[in-house]
Image (tube, rainbow, N blue to C red):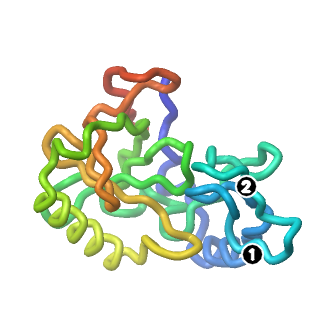
Amino acid sequence: SSTSAVGAAASCPAPQQDHEAWNNYNPGAAAGSGSYGGGGYAATSSSQGKGKGGKGGGKGAKGGPPRPPPPPLDCPTSLPAETADNEQVAFQYCTGTPWQLLGPDGGTFRWDLQDRDVVSQAEKDDIRQVLQNYANEHNIPLRGEFAVKLALLRGSYWVSYAGGISSSTGRAPGKAAGGPIRTAS
């Protein structure tokens, strides 16, 4: 079974509420849930933010829920599904959570890691620029405390901003490989 996408655009909170809720987000409460463990987010005392190292599992300290995505990704159905060149865009806001397709149709998939050499460095550089342009146009943070991961579907592969490669179908949850699991909402 697959995870369905976040609700339709009509169910997204008003933009002012989105930003207000995000501004009140307490990064210390999600200690250890960053993209890479070892420190969580902006923990300020020596007793907070002590991850166990390695990649975080998508949950906060003590098994809490993953952090919410920052605006505008808190309402991914309101963003364009594709770049100016008609290539699908997806994002992941917390390691261990499914990748979410942007746009009104939504959907999710799990990353199915492929050899980094199946896509040339020149093509990765081009994809990185396309994703940077999309992020700039839609105010999506790719660096810093609230950074998210973006990927572009090109041909048979998802290619992330960082250069990672996944099959276009993703993998089934809990399996090493599998068929398509992207779902429309």
Indicate whether 12 appears above or below 117: below
Q: Who's the residue at 58% across and 49% down the image?
A: 55
Amino acid type at circle 1 is Asn
Quadrant in which the C terminus is drawn = top left
Sequence order check, earlier mark of 2 and 1: 1
User: Residue at label 1?
Assistant: 24
> Where's residue 112, x and y in %?
36, 34
Indicate whether 1 appears above or below 73: above
> What is the number of the mark on residue 51?
2
Image position of 37 (left or right of 140): right
How far is disc 2 from disc 1 in space, using C-alphas? 22 Å
Image position of 99 (left or right of 12): left
Image position of 106 (left or right of 20): left
Give the quadrant of residue 111.
top left
Indicate whether 158 appears above or below 171: below
Amino acid type at circle 2 is Gly
Image position of 100 (left or right of 161): right
Q: Give the secondary structure at mark 1.
A: loop
